[in-house]
Amino acid sequence: MPESRETAAPFPSETKIEVVETCTRMAVHADRREWELLRGLFADEVLLDYTSLNGGEPVRLTPQEIVDAWAATLGGFDATQHLIANQLVQLDGDRAVCTASFQATHRLATPHGAPLWTLGGDYRWELTRTGGRWLITSVVMTAAWGDGNKDLPVQAAS
């Protein structure tokens, strides 16, 4: 008997859409401050590499540690908007790599200096399919350019 559509493995194009949606949700949930939903996108341990922006070394964090750090920084802004575009997905069984361009605008009303800081560059996510869901195992952000008040993140975190 042939496999039904409901139990068959998704077509590669459907799988790629699932991967892209997971990565896009990372930006959307962060911008909406939906911390519980954001935490649910990550594997038990995630390699985060924001060294192109902050220096230092990549770190391995739990989903809760990621959410706590991002809530402390992003939560201090009046608003943020992370736009993700040009997603490309490579599949290898239950593993995937998604690359994309991004533009992130951060707004914070401040008595001194411009209220906006915008950053652009590329993201590279690695994901694994676990229990039928795609979970992020690695995030590498490569900043290519910035414009505006680069001191806003420090002000937002304080």
Image: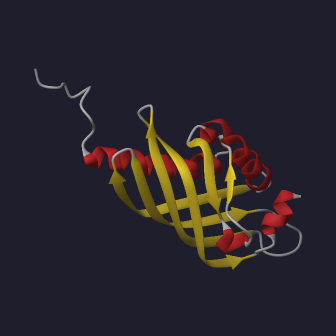
Q: Which residue is painted at 57% across and 42% down in the image?
A: 43
**For residue 98, above or below residue 45:** below
Query: Relative to 41, is 5 on the left or the right?
Result: left
Q: Which residue is painted at 65% across and 40% down in the image?
A: 34
Q: Give the quadrant of residue 51.
A: bottom right
Q: Give the quadrant of residue 35.
A: top right
Q: Which percent across, then down, holds residue 18?
A: 39, 44
Query: Relative to 116, is 151 on the left or the right?
Result: right
Query: Relative to 126, is 10 on the left or the right?
Result: left
Q: Which percent across, then down, holds residue 148?
A: 71, 77
**For residue 85, above or below residue 17:** below
Between 34 and 61, the one nearer to me in the picture? 61
Q: Which residue is painted at 89% across and 69% down in the image?
A: 111
Q: Which residue is painted at 67% across and 63% down in the image?
A: 58
Query: Relative to 36, is 124 on the left or the right?
Result: left
Quadrant assignment for the C terminus: bottom right
